[in-house]
Image (cartoon, rainbow, N blue to C red):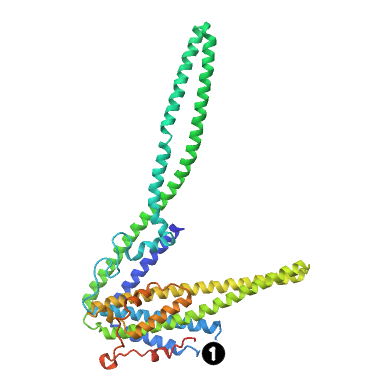
Amino acid sequence: DVPSNLGSAVADACVLYLGRAVEKLKVASQNSDMIIHKIEEEVDALASALPAATSNPGVMDLMTHRDCHKVAAEKYSTVAGIVVLSATTGAGGLEEGPGAGAGVESDGKQAGILPSLLGDTYDAVISNRSEYEELKVQMNDALASTRTEREALTSEREDCQSRKEEINLRLLELRLDMERLEKEALQLDEKISTAEDKLEELDRDCDDNVRHMKMQLEEKAKIAKLEDDARVVAEKLHKLEGALSMSCATVANQNDNGGNSMSVEKMSNKMGIYFARMRNYFKAEAEAVEFMAARADSLTGEIKDLEREIAECRSLGMATNVAQLNQTLKRTRRNMDDDNSVVTALRGEAEKMRDDLVMRLGEYKAASIELGAKANQAFSSLQMSVLTGIKDAMSRIGIEDGGLHTYLDSFVGEVIATPPTPEENGTHLDLGDLTEPIRSVE
């Protein structure tokens, strides 16, 4: 299972790095304000096309609102990436060097590449090597534990066989001693037989243990080789990311004319809009997941009632009713499975959007610090409130927050009390105006 997923994970990583490189090149070679304005126009057009919310929304209404908010959040994720890259470019060029800004480690786990390559088997693969070495030691001990006794019995058997040959020769020569020698020969035969039986028993027991350990050792060796290969691939991907970062930095420094620089205040305003878009998406996603999950639970109750009714009809000999109820039961189970599959798919989409949000948060924080702002000046109290709402929506959806709580916990009591005023930067964030075009289902 792991080898079949390894190629896919490598391909996904390459696509991610190339996509980031293209995004950086776009920011370096084009005017960021023009790109942001174009994306915002697309989001506004999407918002105006969204139908009004109803008091009792159905699944189609929920899914329509959810899809609209998801697309808006994805588009504004691009805006968030552009403003962060513009800010860092204006402050002194893009980061250079292998794995710049990615928080990589030097042992092959760069940017979480190795866990993504190995997937769910990552922990098993990492712990496999110690088990592999331990099994080698156990197998050697198992062989060594019987070596002394084996050598003694083998030596005894050989001595007895040699002695028997001498006696057989002497029988030809010494007819008078025939009886005595034959009796001694019989005794030696018994010893030989006993020694051989013990040897066979030892061989049988030892062979079973060694065979089992050998099979385990071979399996562990395969997984260990897979780990080594995955580390090599991770290292190559790390170098690829570094090369792309260096190339992007070179192009950005060549094309940078100062037009792409962005102030901390402007970047903060754009990121606030992005957070609000994400909040709208996660609220809509939570409504959709809760609706589908509740419907699946309702179908589960119907299934129990149908099963009880079928049992009653079968006990009464009502074959026709049983057949009809069985058809209804199959259809209800199929509908329940479909609803559960939709819930799983929606949660998967939410996890991807969550990962994008956490990535943008890290970039935003790093860019703010690089531009000279203090770490606790990256987020206003209003933005922290929006992020808290996103975290609550993730809990309703049924997914982990992906580390979002670490950002919230680290800024408790340290955020700006109020967002920047319009007089200070001219780009005051008004969440009321932002959320009006795209209405969340309440």
Residue in the picture at 65% in, 70% down: 330
* 137 displayed left or right of 330: left
Nearest the viewer among 109 and 245 is: 109
Classify residue 183 by image quadrant: top right
Residue in the picture at 52% in, 29% down: 197
Name the spot of residue 142 as percent of width and height, x first: 43, 39
Which amino acid is tagged 1? Ser
* 221 displayed left or right of 242: right
Nearest the viewer among 178 and 296 is: 178
The residue furthest top is 176
Helix, strand or loop under label 1: loop
Q: Answer above or below: position of 222 versus 77.
A: above
User: Crowding at label 1, few (<14), some or many (≥20) Cα neighbours within 10 Å?
Assistant: few
Classify residue 322 by image quadrant: bottom right
Determine if residue 137 is in view.
yes
Name the spot of residue 284 as percent of width and height, x first: 47, 82
Residue picked out by circle 1: 55
Q: Answer above or below: position of 229 versus 13.
A: above
